[in-house]
Image: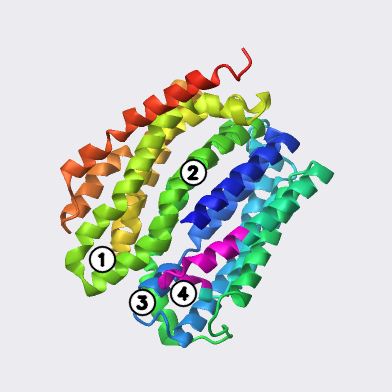
């Protein structure tokens, strides 16, 4: 966990440096490239990580080598899919089918997407020893690899940004970071090296397990990235860059829970489901409590002082990200339910979060355009922040089938919002003397 926090501190520090070197519109272009990569990653997600972590044969080398070969194939397929998407965006822009002021109309965007998405190929060669470390809760080595690759990539990004003032600095540094992570996964983590071999039965087992994860991931593409897909068509590269900045700050907080749920929650809860099902409920609420308090408290905190945070950390070019940050803070209310993914995997019900992602995607693509049509860009932001709220009854319904509901718990954690708001308001008052009037 400390490794993740250190990584987030490094990310914030790097972001502060880079925003003083590069203009906001370049971050908007980079955000589209990132969105495309996430889009393809989710589209091709066959659940390799949870398949290895959850499977009783997750330590068998033949099984791991099969997973590695599938991972490599997925990497090449992901890059080819990204190339097709890039060419499609370029064709739409050339024929005038996207607004001229849209970030999608940027002439270099297709080339940037193609370059950035080569990280799929690099990541495909990452050792399955990296996944096994998650399975065995060997998180210290994972943290070392992640921090090392992130730090070296950041150094490259700063140097290239200073020299070129180009978005390509961000693309190249990300590729270098991916390459370092892949190499270190083979060199630093002890264990048997992967080799090229594939077993038909193992491959079938992996793909069968991942079928609902694939369905879920397909709709996660739209539920998790639909905001950027839609806003990219309505916003300029500068506005899109400011939105990306605000979203990243919220995602850093959301990521604390997501990282712990993914790295600790999945293997821990899967083990409990196999060996001690009666203890699953207690561990579930024990795992949720600190992060529910963190996420809900942070929502109140950011709503109170989001503008102040932007004004303190960034120059005047980024001031408009403040109201966006305040609005997006409400998305943290739903982020606390991200733990349901490892829970549903642990109890053998991946279809549950597949259904949830279908519902979230449908709500996003219904409510956000409607809000934009009626209330404009600000209305679209509120719809993005709150669109998943109607899925709460569905979550409670699924949980009720496995004795995972507690109304006392759900009401108790809400007290964190006014506490966070109060703390944020105090910071606004204290910071007013440091800000220009």
Judging by the rendered image, the residue that carries numbered circle 4 is 132
Q: Nearer the viewer, residue 284 or 200?
A: 284
* Tag shown at residue 251: 2
In 3D space, how far apart are the residues under numbered discs 1 and 3 (Cα atoms)?
12 Å
- Residue at 58% x, 73% y is 72
Q: Earlier in the sequence, mark 1 or mark 2?
A: 2
Q: Give the magenta-colored segment's residue range.
A: 130-147
Whether residues under marks 1 and 3 lie with C-beta atoms below 8 angstroms apart, the answer is no
Characterize the local packing of mark 2: few (<14), some (14-19) or many (20 or more) Cα atoms within 10 angstroms: some
Q: Position of residue 311 (x, y in %)?
A: 59, 25
Place residue 265 in its image quadrant.
Answer: bottom left
Image height of 346 relative to 117, above or below:
below
Q: Earlier in the sequence, mark 4 or mark 3?
A: 3
Asked whether the viewer can see residue 289, the reply is: yes
Place residue 174 in its image quadrant.
Answer: bottom right
Judging by the rendered image, the residue that carries numbered circle 1 is 347
408 on left or right of 106:
left
Q: Position of residue 68 (x, y in %)?
A: 53, 77
Q: Position of residue 110 (x, y in %)?
A: 70, 49
Image height of 131 relative to 431, above or below:
below
* Mark 2, secondary structure of its residue: helix
Characterize the local packing of mark 1: few (<14), some (14-19) or many (20 or more) Cα atoms within 10 angstroms: some
- Residue at 35% x, 37% y is 296
* Mark 4, secondary structure of its residue: helix
Count of numbered labels shown in the rendering:
4
Judging by the rendered image, the residue that carries numbered circle 3 is 55
């Amino acid at each position: 966990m400390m490794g993740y926090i250190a990584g987030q501190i490094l990310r914030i520090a790097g972001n502060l440096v880079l925003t003083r070197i590069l203009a906001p519109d370049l971050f908007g272009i980079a955000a589209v490239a990132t969105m495309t990569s996430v889009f393809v990653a989710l589209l091709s997600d066959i659940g390799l990580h949870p398949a290895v972590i959850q499977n009783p044969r997750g330590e068998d080398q033949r099984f791991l080598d099969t997973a590695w070969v599938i991972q490599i194939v997925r990497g090449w397929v992901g890059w080819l899919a990204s190339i097709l998407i890039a060419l499609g965006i370029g064709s739409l822009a050339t024929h005038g089918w996207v607004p001229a002021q849209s970030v999608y109309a940027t002439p270099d965007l297709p080339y940037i997407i193609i370059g950035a998405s080569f990280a799929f190929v690099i990541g495909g060669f990452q050792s399955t020893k990296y996944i096994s470390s998650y399975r065995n809760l060997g998180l210290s080595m994972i943290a070392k690899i992640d921090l090392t690759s992130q730090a070296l990539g950041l150094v490259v990004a700063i140097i290239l940004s200073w020299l070129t003032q180009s978005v390509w600095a961000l693309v190249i540094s990300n590729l270098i970071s991916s390459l370092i992570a892949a190499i270190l996964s083979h060199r630093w983590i002890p264990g048997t090296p992967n080799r090229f071999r594939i077993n038909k039965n193992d491959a079938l087992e992996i793909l069968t397990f991942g079928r609902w994860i694939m369905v879920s991931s397909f709709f996660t593409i739209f539920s998790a990235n639909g905001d950027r897909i839609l806003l990219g068509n309505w916003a300029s590269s500068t506005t899109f860059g400011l939105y990306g900045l605000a979203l990243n700050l919220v995602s850093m907080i959301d990521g604390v829970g997501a990282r712990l749920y993914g790295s600790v929650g999945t293997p821990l809860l899967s083990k409990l489901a196999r060996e001690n099902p009666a203890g699953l409920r207690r561990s579930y609420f024990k795992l949720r409590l600190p992060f529910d308090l963190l996420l809900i408290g942070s929502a109140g905190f950011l709503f109170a002082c989001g503008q102040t945070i932007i004004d303190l950390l960034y120059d005047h070019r980024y001031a408009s990200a403040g109201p966006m940050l305040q609005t997006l803070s409400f998305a943290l209310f739903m982020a606390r339910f991200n733990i349901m993914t490892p829970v549903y995997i642990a109890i053998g019900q991946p279809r549950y979060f597949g259904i949830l992602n279908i519902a979230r995607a449908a709500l996003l693509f219904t409510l956000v355009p409607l809000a934009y049509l009626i209330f404009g860009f600000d209305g679209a932001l509120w719809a993005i922040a709150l669109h998943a709220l109607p899925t709460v009854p569905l979550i409670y319904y699924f949980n009720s089938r496995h004795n995972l509901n507690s109304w006392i718990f759900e009401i108790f954690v809400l007290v964190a919002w006014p506490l966070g708001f109060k703390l944020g308001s105090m910071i606004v008052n204290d910071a007013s003397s440091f800000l220009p009037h």
